[in-house]
Image (tube, coloured by chain):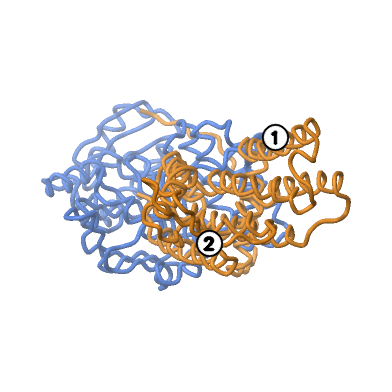
Amino acid sequence: MSKTPLPTTITKLEPPTSHMLPGSLSQVGTVTKYELINYFRSRRFFILLLIGLLIGGILTTLVAYYGISTFASSSLGFYSFWWGNSITFIITINGIFFGGDAISGEFQNKTGYFLVPNPLRRSSIYIGKYFGALLASLMIFGAYAALTVGNGLYYFGTNIPYQFGESLIFSVIFLVAVLGFTFFFSSLFKSSSISILVTAILFLFAFNIIQLLVSTFAQTEPWFIISYGAGIVGNVLMDPYPSTQPIRGAGPRGRDSILFAVTIPEGLAILLGYFLVTAILGLILFERKEFT
Amino acid sequence: MPSIEARDLTKQYGSFAALSNLNLKIEGAKCVGFLGPNGAGKTTTLKIFTDLIRASSGQALINGLDVHKEKKKALDPCGVLIETPEIYPSFTPREALSMIADLRGIPRAGRSKMIETVVSEVKMDEWMDKKVGKFSKGMKQRINIAAALLSEPDIVLLDEPTTGLDPRGQAEVRDIVRSLKQRNRLVFMSSHLLNEVSEICDEVAMIDHGKLLVYDTLAHVTDRFAHDGGGSILQVELTKDIDDQLIKGQISILAGVDSVEKLTPRSLRIKFSGGQEEQARLLTDLVALKIGLLSYRPSASTLEDSYLNLIKDTL
């Protein structure tokens, strides 16, 4: 068979441009930047933003309809009712959907094949993606905080209790811990849907059930549960700060029970402990995980 | 001089050895084809060289640097394409390549031009600012090739780069590889397409069951393994029609020629005996005949024969 040479035009590239490989920190920044761009173009970001705004919108409507006195009599009470009751849920769903498949998606969607064989450490990819998810979550968190403060200013003026500031800080720490945990779980799996499902089940059901069982039946402080540690986000908005106390006849078969209330140092230790342990384990897993 | 080297490279999956003490050193500006049947260990080797998987033992060295221990430095001079990577669907080729440029530290000055040039090289200019999510597999593969070439790498590692490409795309990739050779790059490329390898590669490494069977120049491999009884086949292409008399009277009688088959009026298949020196003399003789010689190369089928003979031996 005769072959007719194909007409091709090979453009000779310029001579190699001298380039200096950026440091790992700079590469983390690059991964974060492009991860954020990807989030901003995804439906996921806008759906989560919408959920945050929807929750805020429902609360705004309820308060406007029934009157603020139905829900809170003081500025602190308002922030406790509003922020303390909802922010952990908003943080949890952000953590699940931004972190749940952040790493597993690189395997399932094969996007890792585009990124990993470049001259950068895997840890730079992991940390960059973590910061991307954290910043995206913080934007939604910020929008919800603005809505909360807007209502607080409307009903109680500029009298924002300092405890709200503390709760904001604890919420951010909780977000950091939740993302650390979801990233770790994401590193365990190669399927996006499974990793999201598992983290969702854990955060929305399993932790709460375990916490309830351990405190009610074993009457043991559930210090090893992240959601117990997150109790400081709402507790700090209560005056006085709740304390662990026995409750007569509240246990099974009418036995006495103990209502555990996490203290601020305990809560911070649990959240930071979760973050540190899961971040280290997640990094190790991702470093070792193979693209097979 | 760019180099890649596998030292006792082994990869175990439980009791299955995907790679077994692979030793291979490739140096210099050339194109090396990496051949083997499915599951032979080609992709495993390339994945180890690019940090996608880890070796169970042994070392993968690029320019003397262990990829596992010094990944950043080792992969800095490399452009890589393994399988068919996916790019974030919301990205345009310009954005995807800008990300690679950022990660590789390509200076901002002139970066746009580099991206445009490399995208133009893979014939995707018109799609530069369209979202990758809408691209076909072949179009994505072109962008992946552009990403591999973006930093003007000294070493290019390609795993079946023409996968998903139409025949025109495959021909263009072959031209790109040829142009890389001209620019003194080392190209290490796995492929199932033997005609592709025989067309563009200078050397071949064959692997099966995780073991290296042979690594040598294309001519040496075909010399040694093409036919059980010896002899080689050359594919000759001409710029003008050739008549049968000329074939019988002048080409068939040349030294070393066993038989000549006219494939088309402008292409011949010559079976000849002898090594490289005889092959070189035959080329000189054919040029002297002024038959309008356009190309002269070992036939893909000789490589196929070599491949089948080698692989058969290991079954």
Q: Residues within 10 Å of mark 2 (few under 14, many from 20)?
A: few
Which residue is identified by label 1?
A: A54
Q: Is residue A122 left or right of residue B130?
A: left
Q: Residue at x 37, y 26 (%)?
A: B265
Answer whether residue B84 is visible to the viewer in this image: no
* Image mark 1: chain: A
Which residue is identified by label 2?
A: A244
Query: Which chain gets the orange colouring?
Result: A
Count of marks placed on residues: 2
Above or below: residue B294 compared with residue A243: above
Quadrant in which residue B242 is drawn: top left
The three-letter code of the residue at mark 1 reads Leu
Q: How crowded is mark 1: few (under 14 residues within 10 Å), some or many (20 or more)?
A: few
Q: Which residue is drawn at 56% across and 47% down?
A: A92
Q: Which residue is drawn at 44% across and 59% down?
A: A222
Instruction: State which quarter of the image contains the N terminus of chain B.
Output: bottom left
Which is more toward the observer, B42 or A221?
A221
Residue B113 x/y as whole percent: 70, 51
Q: Mark 2 near mark 1, Cβ–Cβ under 8 Å? A: no
Query: Which chain gets the blue colouring?
Result: B
Which is more toward the observer, B111 or B31?
B111
